[in-house]
Image (tube, rainbow, N blue to C red):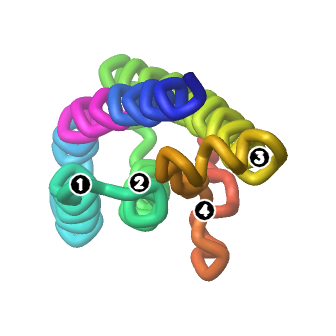
Amino acid sequence: TLVNRAKEAWADIAVQLKRRYDLIPNLVETVKGYAAHESSAFENVTKARAAAMGAPNPTPATQAQVENQLSGALKTLFAVSEAYPDLKANQNFLQLQKELGDTEDKIQASRRFYNTTVMELNTTEQSFPGNLIASSFGFKPMDLFELAAADSAAAEPVKVKF
């Protein structure tokens, strides 16, 4: 039951990440219309999105790493948007920003649920009598989905000032 619940929680994270990936191109195109000369920021977001989407058979650790890179690239994109007053008033940009914020909240909730489930699974596998059953059936501890300790930029909240 716990293994299946952890797999379901991982699938929930994947669904929210897919939603995030779908929103990003629209956000980039909206900002691009206002800040055409900021091409490096757009390229970085696009590359980070592609890397996050293209991770083959991601583990929680590898997925967290590419998601941290994508978060950093998005922070840069929002920093670029601060310099354009017309963009800040654009309804499409505001809606996309709101949807992306909502998606980020859902990703955090999915990560918390996954980590709670994995912690419960790992604790059960390491405690008596669960450890006997887990070793008999070959269950292995699962990894938590966490920020990389070395990536302090991803650990800080996004700061967008209007």
The location of residue 112, given as percent across then percent down, is 67, 36
Front label number (2 vs 1): 1
Q: Give the residue drawn at x 51%, y 49%.
A: 139
In the visual, does 109 lie left or right of 68? right
Towards the viewer: 155 or 64: 64
Front label number (4 vs 1): 1
Q: Which residues are magenta?
A: 17-27
| Quarter of the figure with the C terminus | top right
- In magenta stretch: residue 18: yes
- In magenta stretch: residue 3: no
The earlier-in-sequence mark between 2 and 3 is: 2
| Mark 4 and mark 1: Cα distance apart in space | 19 Å
In the visual, does 161 lie left or right of 26? right
The earlier-in-sequence mark between 2 and 4 is: 2
Q: Give the residue drawn at x 41%, y 54%.
A: 74
Q: Give the residue drawn at x 44%, y 41%.
A: 85
Residue that badge 3 annotates: 123
Whether residue 96 is situated above or below residue 155 in the rendered picture? above
Disc marking residue 44: none
Give, as a three-letter code, the residue at label 4: Leu
| Mark 2 and mark 3: Cα distance apart in space | 36 Å
| Mark 1 and mark 3: Cα distance apart in space | 25 Å
Front label number (4 vs 3): 3
